Protein backbone atom coordinates (compact mmCIF):
# COMPACT_ATOMS: atom_id res chain seq x y z
CA UNK A 1 0.00 0.00 0.00
CA UNK A 2 2.81 2.36 0.86
CA UNK A 3 4.46 1.69 -2.55
CA UNK A 4 1.18 2.49 -4.31
CA UNK A 5 0.84 5.81 -2.46
CA UNK A 6 4.47 6.68 -3.33
CA UNK A 7 3.85 5.90 -7.03
CA UNK A 8 0.71 8.05 -7.04
CA UNK A 9 2.57 10.90 -5.35
CA UNK A 10 5.31 10.70 -8.00
CA UNK A 11 2.70 10.80 -10.77
CA UNK A 12 1.09 13.90 -9.26
CA UNK A 13 4.48 15.59 -9.13
CA UNK A 14 5.28 14.88 -12.79
CA UNK A 15 1.87 15.43 -14.41
CA UNK A 16 2.00 19.26 -14.03
CA UNK A 17 5.59 19.28 -15.35
CA UNK A 18 4.58 17.27 -18.41
CA UNK A 19 1.56 19.49 -19.01
CA UNK A 20 3.78 22.57 -18.84
CA UNK A 21 6.06 21.05 -21.50
CA UNK A 22 3.25 20.28 -23.96
CA UNK A 23 3.55 22.35 -27.11
CA UNK A 24 1.49 25.51 -27.29
CA UNK A 25 0.89 27.22 -30.59
CA UNK A 26 -1.42 29.90 -31.86
CA UNK A 27 -4.43 29.25 -34.06
CA UNK A 28 -5.63 32.07 -36.30
CA UNK A 29 -7.76 32.46 -39.39
CA UNK A 30 -11.16 31.45 -40.62
CA UNK A 31 -12.33 27.88 -40.13
CA UNK A 32 -15.98 28.49 -40.94
CA UNK A 33 -17.99 26.26 -43.22
CA UNK A 34 -16.90 22.84 -41.96
CA UNK A 35 -19.06 20.20 -43.63
CA UNK A 36 -20.99 17.69 -41.57
CA UNK A 37 -18.67 15.22 -39.90
CA UNK A 38 -15.61 17.48 -40.23
CA UNK A 39 -13.97 19.51 -37.48
CA UNK A 40 -11.17 21.98 -37.15
CA UNK A 41 -10.24 20.28 -33.86
CA UNK A 42 -9.41 17.10 -35.80
CA UNK A 43 -7.24 19.14 -38.19
CA UNK A 44 -5.43 20.78 -35.27
CA UNK A 45 -4.77 17.36 -33.74
CA UNK A 46 -3.44 16.01 -37.06
CA UNK A 47 -1.13 19.02 -37.45
CA UNK A 48 0.23 18.72 -33.93
CA UNK A 49 0.69 14.97 -34.37
CA UNK A 50 2.46 15.50 -37.72
CA UNK A 51 5.09 17.77 -36.16
CA UNK A 52 5.64 15.33 -33.28
CA UNK A 53 5.91 12.36 -35.64
CA UNK A 54 8.22 14.18 -38.08
CA UNK A 55 10.59 15.19 -35.27
CA UNK A 56 10.73 11.57 -34.08
CA UNK A 57 10.85 10.11 -37.63
CA UNK A 58 7.89 8.03 -36.40
CA UNK A 59 6.34 6.04 -39.26
CA UNK A 60 3.16 5.16 -37.36
CA UNK A 61 2.66 8.76 -36.25
CA UNK A 62 3.18 10.10 -39.77
CA UNK A 63 0.75 7.50 -41.11
CA UNK A 64 -1.89 8.53 -38.55
CA UNK A 65 -1.55 12.23 -39.31
CA UNK A 66 -1.41 11.99 -43.10
CA UNK A 67 -4.18 10.86 -45.43
CA UNK A 68 -3.98 7.26 -46.59
CA UNK A 69 -3.57 8.11 -50.26
CA UNK A 70 -1.37 6.62 -52.89
CA UNK A 71 -0.02 10.06 -53.64
CA UNK A 72 0.69 12.79 -51.13
CA UNK A 73 2.41 16.09 -51.80
CA UNK A 74 5.36 16.92 -49.55
CA UNK A 75 8.26 19.21 -50.26
CA UNK A 76 11.03 20.89 -48.34
CA UNK A 77 12.63 23.99 -49.79
CA UNK A 78 16.23 25.05 -49.40
CA UNK A 79 16.80 26.91 -46.13
CA UNK A 80 20.55 27.34 -46.77
CA UNK A 81 22.78 27.17 -49.82
CA UNK A 82 23.88 23.65 -48.89
CA UNK A 83 20.38 22.41 -48.02
CA UNK A 84 18.60 20.20 -50.55
CA UNK A 85 15.23 20.75 -52.20
CA UNK A 86 13.17 17.60 -51.69
CA UNK A 87 9.86 16.41 -53.11
CA UNK A 88 8.10 13.26 -51.92
CA UNK A 89 4.75 11.78 -52.97
CA UNK A 90 4.43 8.70 -50.77
CA UNK A 91 4.49 8.06 -47.04
CA UNK A 92 7.63 5.84 -47.31
CA UNK A 93 9.47 8.63 -49.15
CA UNK A 94 8.40 11.21 -46.55
CA UNK A 95 9.55 8.89 -43.76
CA UNK A 96 12.89 8.34 -45.50
CA UNK A 97 13.42 12.11 -45.65
CA UNK A 98 12.42 12.51 -41.98
CA UNK A 99 14.94 9.80 -41.00
CA UNK A 100 17.71 11.48 -43.00
CA UNK A 101 16.92 14.79 -41.31
CA UNK A 102 16.80 13.09 -37.89
CA UNK A 103 20.42 12.05 -38.43
CA UNK A 104 21.18 15.80 -38.49
CA UNK A 105 19.16 16.30 -35.29
CA UNK A 106 16.53 18.29 -37.15
CA UNK A 107 13.75 19.80 -35.09
CA UNK A 108 10.66 21.60 -36.35
CA UNK A 109 9.01 23.70 -33.65
CA UNK A 110 5.47 24.78 -34.45
CA UNK A 111 4.71 28.41 -33.53
CA UNK A 112 1.24 28.80 -34.96
CA UNK A 113 -1.16 28.03 -37.79
CA UNK A 114 -3.24 30.32 -39.96
CA UNK A 115 -6.33 28.56 -41.31
CA UNK A 116 -8.38 29.36 -44.41
CA UNK A 117 -12.09 28.53 -44.78
CA UNK A 118 -13.14 24.98 -45.54
CA UNK A 119 -13.50 24.22 -49.25
CA UNK A 120 -15.64 21.16 -49.43
CA UNK A 121 -14.00 18.54 -47.20
CA UNK A 122 -10.58 20.20 -47.24
CA UNK A 123 -9.08 22.86 -44.99
CA UNK A 124 -6.08 24.92 -46.09
CA UNK A 125 -3.57 26.12 -43.53
CA UNK A 126 -0.19 27.83 -43.19
CA UNK A 127 1.93 26.46 -40.35
CA UNK A 128 4.60 28.82 -39.03
CA UNK A 129 7.54 27.03 -37.43
CA UNK A 130 11.24 27.20 -36.76
CA UNK A 131 13.64 24.66 -38.21
CA UNK A 132 16.94 23.75 -36.62
CA UNK A 133 19.52 21.08 -37.42
CA UNK A 134 23.25 20.51 -37.13
CA UNK A 135 23.75 21.24 -40.83
CA UNK A 136 21.57 24.39 -40.98
CA UNK A 137 23.65 26.71 -38.84
CA UNK A 138 23.71 27.83 -35.22
CA UNK A 139 20.27 29.48 -35.07
CA UNK A 140 16.78 28.15 -35.77
CA UNK A 141 15.49 29.30 -39.14
CA UNK A 142 11.93 30.60 -39.55
CA UNK A 143 9.76 28.49 -41.83
CA UNK A 144 6.31 28.46 -43.34
CA UNK A 145 4.40 25.75 -45.14
CA UNK A 146 1.49 25.68 -47.52
CA UNK A 147 -0.59 22.75 -46.39
CA UNK A 148 -3.98 21.10 -46.63
CA UNK A 149 -5.99 18.82 -44.36
CA UNK A 150 -8.63 16.45 -45.74
CA UNK A 151 -11.59 15.78 -43.43
CA UNK A 152 -11.34 12.52 -41.50
CA UNK A 153 -8.34 11.48 -43.61
CA UNK A 154 -5.41 13.65 -42.56
CA UNK A 155 -2.86 15.98 -44.10
CA UNK A 156 -2.60 15.63 -47.87
CA UNK A 157 -0.29 18.55 -48.75
CA UNK A 158 2.69 19.87 -46.81
CA UNK A 159 5.15 22.14 -48.63
CA UNK A 160 7.85 23.61 -46.35
CA UNK A 161 9.87 26.70 -47.21
CA UNK A 162 11.87 29.47 -45.56
CA UNK A 163 9.59 32.20 -44.20
CA UNK A 164 9.89 35.53 -46.03
CA UNK A 165 11.56 38.16 -43.88
CA UNK A 166 8.52 40.45 -44.14
CA UNK A 167 6.12 37.77 -42.82
CA UNK A 168 5.80 38.12 -39.02
CA UNK A 169 4.01 34.80 -38.62
CA UNK A 170 0.91 34.21 -36.55
CA UNK A 171 0.41 36.94 -33.95
Image (cartoon, rainbow, N blue to C red):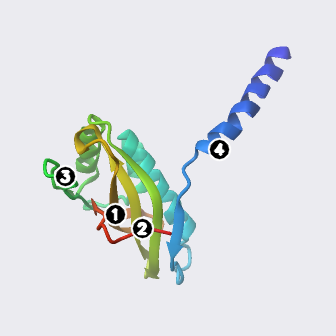
The mark nearer the N terminus, 3 or 4, is: 4
Determine whether the residue tagged by mark 2 lies in a helix, strand or loop. loop
Name the foreground residue: 138 vs 112. Answer: 138
Q: Work out whether residue 64 can be spotted.
A: no
Q: Nearer the viewer, mark 1 or mark 2?
A: 2
Name the foreground residue: 45 vs 10. Answer: 10
Q: Is residue 110 left or right of residue 98?
A: right
Establish if 72 lies above or below 102.
Answer: below
Determine whether the residue tagged by mark 4 lies in a helix, strand or loop. helix
Residue located beneath label 2 in the image: 169
Q: CA distance from mark 2 to mark 4?
A: 25 Å
Q: CA distance from mark 4 to mark 1?
A: 26 Å
Asked if the residue under mark 2 is in contact with the one under mark 1, i.e. CB atoms within 8 Å, the reply is: yes
> Which residue shows up at 27% across the image and 34% down it?
103
Q: What is the crowding at mark 2: few (fewer than 14 residues within 10 Å), some, or many (at least 20)?
A: many
Residue located beneath label 4 in the image: 19
The location of residue 105, given as percent across then percent down, is: 32, 36
Residue located beneath label 1 in the image: 144
Q: CA distance from mark 1 to mark 2?
A: 8 Å
Determine whether the residue tagged by mark 1 lies in a helix, strand or loop. strand
The mark nearer the N terminus, 4 or 1, is: 4
Residue lying furthest right in this view? 1
Amino acid sequence: MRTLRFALALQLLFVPALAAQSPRWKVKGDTTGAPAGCSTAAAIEAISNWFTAYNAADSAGLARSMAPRRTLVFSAGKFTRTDSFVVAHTLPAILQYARIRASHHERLTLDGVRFYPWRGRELGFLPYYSRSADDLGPRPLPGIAKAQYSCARGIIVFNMAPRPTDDPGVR
